[in-house]
Image (tube, helix red, strand yellow):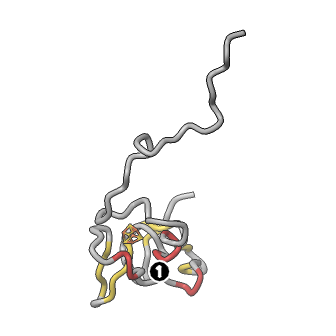
């Protein structure tokens, strides 16, 4: 399936929610505005003075379980640095 171009808020942007017969099939029929924590992210897109996320239709969802993994304005700590081994103990030689 090929993505169609948006004709609602992100006009011209290819989107999987856009359909030929029904238009935008995302909940509410259009992308949602940015979440408060999105402020400062380079991926915001302003349309008619309203800010949207250029890649996600509902930015608040991306922050529900922690930091948005695509945010450009926050520093993501390396997982390796915080890696803690649990349950691995050296076996004693008998
Ligand atoms: S990439 Fe994440 S932080 Fe940036 S605007 Fe989109 S949802 Fe918000």
Which quarter of the rendering shows the C terminus?
top right
Indicate the quadrant where residue 14 lies.
bottom left
Q: Position of residue 6 (x, y in %)?
A: 44, 75
Q: Residue at x 40, y 80 (%)?
A: 34
Indicate whether 12 appears above or below 78: below
> In this view, which residue lies farthest toward the front?
94
Indicate the quadrant where residue 86 lies.
top right
Which of these two is toward me, 83 or 78? 83
Q: Residue at x 32, y 58 (%)?
A: 75
Which of these two is toward me, 49 or 4? 49
Q: Position of residue 4 (x, y in %)?
A: 48, 68
Which quarter of the rendering shows the N terminus?
bottom right
Q: In the image, is the residue at mark 1 within 8 Å of ligand 1 by its beta carbon?
A: no
Q: Position of residue 49 (x, y in %)?
A: 27, 90
Q: Check disc 1 and report the residue beneath it.
A: 31
Q: Residue at x 42, y 84 (%)?
A: 33
> In this view, which residue lies farthest toward the right?
94
Crowding around mark 1 (Cα neighbors within 10 Å: few <14, some 14 to 19, many 20+) is: many
Q: Position of residue 24 (x, y in %)?
A: 54, 79
Q: Name the quadrant where ligand 1 sits.
A: bottom left
Q: Residue at x 30, y 62 (%)?
A: 72
Looking at the rendered structure, the secondary structure element under dot 1 is loop
Q: Is residue 62 left or right of residue 36?
A: right
Q: Is residue 61 left or right of residue 7?
A: right
- Tally of numbered tags: 1
Indicate whether 24 appears above or below 62: below
């Amino acid at each position: 399936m090929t993505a169609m171009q948006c004709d609602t808020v992100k006009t011209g942007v290819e989107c999987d929610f856009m359909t030929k017969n029904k238009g935008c099939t995302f909940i509410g029929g259009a992308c949602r505005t940015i979440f408060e924590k999105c402020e400062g992210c380079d991926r915001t897109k302003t349309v008619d003075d309203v800010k949207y996320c250029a890649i996600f239709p509902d930015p608040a969802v991306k922050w529900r379980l922690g930091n948005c993994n695509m945010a450009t304005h926050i520093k993501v700590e390396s997982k390796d640095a915080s890696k803690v081994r649990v349950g691995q103990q050296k076996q004693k030689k008998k």
